[in-house]
Image: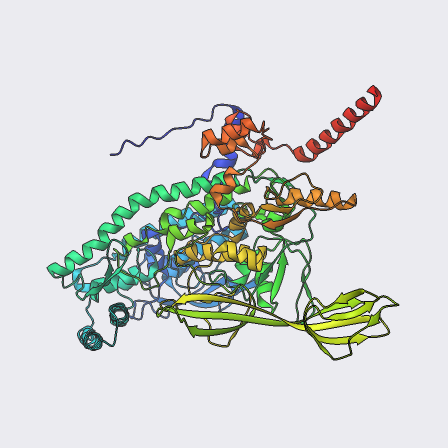
Amino acid sequence: FDGDQMAVHVPLSQKAVQEARELMLASRNLLKPADGEPIISPSKDMVLGVYYLTMEQKAKHKGDGFSFADMDEVEMAYMLDHVEVHSEINLRALTWYDDQGNRLSEPETRVINTTVGRVLFNRVLPEEVLFVNEKLDKGGVKDLIAEVYELCGQEKTTDVADKIKTIGFEYAMKSGITLAVADITIPPERKTIIEDALKSVELVQRDFRRGLLTEQEKNEREIEVWQETTDLVGKAVRAHMDPDGNLSTMATSGATKGGFSTISQLAGMRGLMADPSGRIIPMPIRSNFREGLTAQEYFISTHGARKGLADTALRTADAGYLTRRLVDIAQDIITNEHDCGTTEGIYIRRKDDVAGQALSSRLFSRLLAENVIDPETGEVIGETGDVITQDLARRISATSLAEVKVRSPLSCTLQHGICSKCYGLDLGRGAMVELGSAVGIVAAQSIGEPGTQLTLRTFHTGGVAAGGADITTGLPRVEELFEARKMPKGEAFIAEISGTLHIDQSEKYADLREVVIESSQLVSDEYSIPEDWKIEVKDEAEVKAADVLATLDDAKIVAQHGGRVRVEKKARKVVVSYDQKESVSYDIPNTSRLLIKNNEKVEAGQPLTEGSLNPHRVLKIQGREACQMYLMTEVQKVYRSQGQNIHDKHFEVIIRKMLSKVQIVRPGDANYLPGDVVDRLEIRNINEDLLAEGKQPARFSEVLLGVTKASLSTDSFLSASSFQHTIKVLAGAAIGATTDPLIGLKENVIIGKLIPAGTGFIYGRFTDAAEEEENTDAEQLADAEAGD
């Protein structure tokens, strides 16, 4: 017992009671705000029961081949013991689906070949989703609940989920599914597979003794051999399992953790283990749990298990800290307007692989920024401003369209918060996002909440080594990306210019390769020659830099660069064309794996070696859009590899804040100094005003800030001081006589005001404030003039 405490909140006032009942009640929050999937879906024994009920078995059963007129008859026959749960029967029923499981526009009555168990299961479903005639595992039940929600709404979904729970428990009990040691069959070919592996390892060691391999190569080869062996043994275990037996029912239904990997540890071999620092021990555990481990194997295997438990304790704190930083950066992002009026958006391209997501799931819940037209038929599938529902997303995905332009939090032009149309649907409600929704907090929590699951994975498989390169993964990788580290671990080299690439061995060092990228392009300088000047060069002549092109008395025009001359006498122009060469060289260690071949053409921003890219360099070389795409793809990879689905828009909300500032390079007529870091949208507005007045706009470069830095560079000193470096922030605010605009949630909570979101939201508070400011300025001016 660690002395944890919990508070109980009692809603006292009428308003609080109403809020608790209408907004916070569990049955009103059935969808997960992270991805719009149902939160409530049966698991463990409930799934086992449903799977048992809906599966088919090869064995013969009492009452196979009977025909029934309706579901009531089937239930009656089952109660009178004329048929069994897995008897195959023919049933005349009303169904919404064809034989392939596709939904029809109207239900039809026809004879279906099904099982008694499936009929019993369909008894608890509403009419709108009959007749489910397939084997349902955990995922299948979840999809079914999502479909019920879409078709029947909230009330019925809670009811159906409850009924599925009851029937699941009941049939899990009636099935009598259980496990004995004897059920675990060890495949006979296991012995020969392991003997072959030992022979391969012996060959590797022989090469090592002869000096043909380095120690690192030897270890890598051995690990490769043992990983392949573990896979082969696992496949053999699966092949020898009885598909209708208890063990495979438990594994395939999704009712248990681990699925088949745990079974192959029971019946096959445990395989390679990782030591506490995460390195793979090149001595595999060849035994399995059914036979038992040797003493030495037992000790190697405790490594993993212990690391799992120690990790759990440490990581929870890390994940909590990440959530805190994300909440801090995003807490002032609230939907403040219906529409910011932008015509911009982002392109969602089919070829972009954002961690293996389907095009439809990336489009879902956004608004179209331009019409979508089927390239084959020319039919308009969706118009600008349409919400992309699941159905529309599927229809767009079915065409051959390469890209779709959609509204996105990244391209919203509101200076404070975000507009509803750039955000799209509120995934937790399945409707357009309401004004005053704290979308920033929702994004931060959706990303932070699965954080605890990211690195606790070592715990489930008991530290069994999963193959993969030695790059940062899990929570540390997410942190590295959100903090926009300048030196990510295992950084890849990246091409700074486009051109042709040459690879040479470095002359100075034996363990380095020199990679040179050369680019050349034809450039021309134009010189206008005034009327009475004399042109001194002939057409097609070659000139050097500083050669005289034209003269008038003592005055002369000289060539800036050497090259070939073209004289245009009518236009009185001399054009000098020359090759502009550029080259960049990199010293790359021999241990890094190159991704390109000699004499290949590369584009600027293309990675040259394997590893993580530095997001700051991506921003500098390829620009803002490429940087956003890289950050999002990389973070999504980590979450998706752990089976955590989070909608892209939540990451976009955070990345929007990371890229919200720019650095002034030349201030022009703006009231800034070079090097000032200012808000991007603010400087855009200032530049528009300056251009309208015919003045010089400010020049700036994009900056990428990590979440901690971005939180501290907010306009609100109350929010920043309650986050980190309190004294420094407060002292700085006092010296600069800063005012706090009280835009976000934190600063309002600190001074005891209602938060400007949800029920405390005031529409138009920024437009009103701006108008008021203009009015007071005008009044002061008028007063001053009157005083004169």
The reply to whether residue 150 is visible in this rendering is yes
Q: Between residues 267 and 349, which one lies in front from this camera angle? A: 349
Q: Position of residue 453 (x, y in %)?
A: 36, 49
Please give left or right for residue 99 compared with residue 233 in the image.
right
Spot the residue most to the right: 532
Quadrant assignment for the C terminus: top right
Above or below 784: residue 509: below
Residue at image coords 42%, 28%: 9
Q: Between residues 194 and 95, which one lies in front from this camera angle? A: 194
Q: Position of residue 136 (x, y in %)?
A: 39, 60
Q: Quadrant of residue 321?
A: top left
Above or below 638: residue 379: below
Residue at image coords 71%, 46%: 697
Quadrant assignment for the N terminus: top left
Please give left or right for residue 776 compared with residue 486 in the image.
right
Q: Quadrant of residue 210?
A: bottom left
